[in-house]
Image: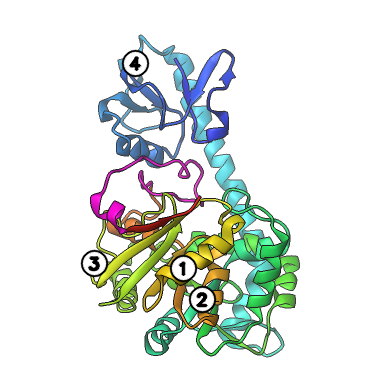
Amino acid sequence: MFLLDNNAQLTGKEIEGIRIYTPYNFPQGAVDYIYVFMYEYETVRQELLDLGTDCECIVCFSGLDLELQEYENVFNIDAADRLQLRIKTDYLIGRIRQLEEEYQYFEQNYIYEAADMFKHKKISLPKVCSVETTCKKIISDKCSMSRYGDGEFEIIFGHAKDIYQGNDEALAKRLREILLSDLDNHIIALADDYGAMQGIRRKNRNTIRRYMTEEKREKHYALLNMDKEYYNAYISRPYVIYPHNEIERAKERFDNLKRIWASCDILLVEGESTRMGVGNDLFANAESIQRIIAPNENAYKIYDEIYHAALQYGKDKLILIALGPTATVLAYDLAKEGYWALDIGHLDLEYEWFLKGKGYSYVPDKYNNEMLGDTTVIDIRDEDYEKSIVCFLE
């Protein structure tokens, strides 16, 4: 018997003498059954299936079709029945607390959402144009773009999300500088989190409300030029922040984005396990693809090497960058040298999720810094991917 947990930091530890593995490294050959003790179990079940686990081995303890009598040689049936009830009760109590919290944040943020919808002049809001306008601007002017989301702002505030980029004062200083810059061939895009958030799915709106407290809003506003029109950072989020059943609208957003690199020679600057375009047709209409590979995490530590490699290999190419906050700085510095560079963030993962059509989901062979456990990836062998790498930086 052993336990599975997506938190890699627990790997190898024990609870009451029972060893903990991750779903990536447990001894599958020694397994008869894997019991999933979660009320909302489908995501975990799908991850196990994606990792090659036999579906007959996965027993979802809260599944409506589970017949406990079939496992009387494993469970004490009466105790298992009580545990099922406890799991459901704990889940419902947690949901009630979550809904109460969501309502609290909704009340707190609603004055800004209403001000955006009704254009109330007494409420100050940053000016952020639409995703469609942002895409048209990039295509028509071939301008570079740096994006700012909560990750970039938190580095400026000294509260970095350590999973992919730790606090770095030099990086924070550059992010503050670029936020107020004004180059003719470069645009700054903000996550449009300040007003009505129209069109965004409810769960994402609630997450934004939880983040955008009065204190946080005040700190953002202190960094922004409130008279400036910013572009929309959600250009790199064509699918998952919107209602997941709006497939045709998501397809239209991706098709518009694909027009940016149609028939272009492109240079991808990405993390070691990001693998943009591998296994999908996101960049199928590009003329050619080359790659610079940098570290998945704390890439800014070797910023000079990344920058000089991009200068060397990116001449006369469209440079697409997926490298966390480092991409924000790199797109700006390359624009200053006359290059065309776009910070595109999680766009490839968004495309993978869109193709599956299930919202957020596990992608075994691609690094994802936003979901616990998805920073561990399965190795792959892809000849075209290997051939496209022109520079590998560590």
Q: CA distance from mark 3 to mark 4?
A: 42 Å
Mark identifier at residue 310: 1
The amino acid marked with disc number 3 is Ala
First in sequence: mark 2 vs mark 1: 1
Q: Which residue is drawn at the image coordinates 63% and 49% (left, top)? A: 162
| Comparing labels 2 and 4, the label whose residue is closer to the camera | 2
| Residue at disc 4, secondary structure | helix
User: Considering depth in this image, is 18 or 248 the residue closer to the camera?
Assistant: 18
Residue for badge 3: 284
| Residue at disc 1, secondary structure | helix
First in sequence: mark 1 vs mark 3: 3
Q: Is residue 387 magenta?
A: yes
Prevailing secondary structure of the magenta residues: loop
Neighbour tally class for label 1: few under 14, some 14-19, many 20 plus, Cα within 10 Å: many
- Relative height, residue 383 to residue 334 (above, below): above
Mark identifier at residue 30: 4
| Comparing labels 1 and 3, the label whose residue is closer to the camera | 1
The amino acid marked with disc number 2 is Leu
Q: Which region is colored magenta? A: 362-388
| Residue at disc 2, secondary structure | helix
Q: CA distance from mark 2 to mark 1?
A: 8 Å
| Comparing labels 4 and 1, the label whose residue is closer to the camera | 1
Please report contact status of discs 3 and 4: CB closer than 8 Å, yes or no. Answer: no
Residue for badge 2: 334
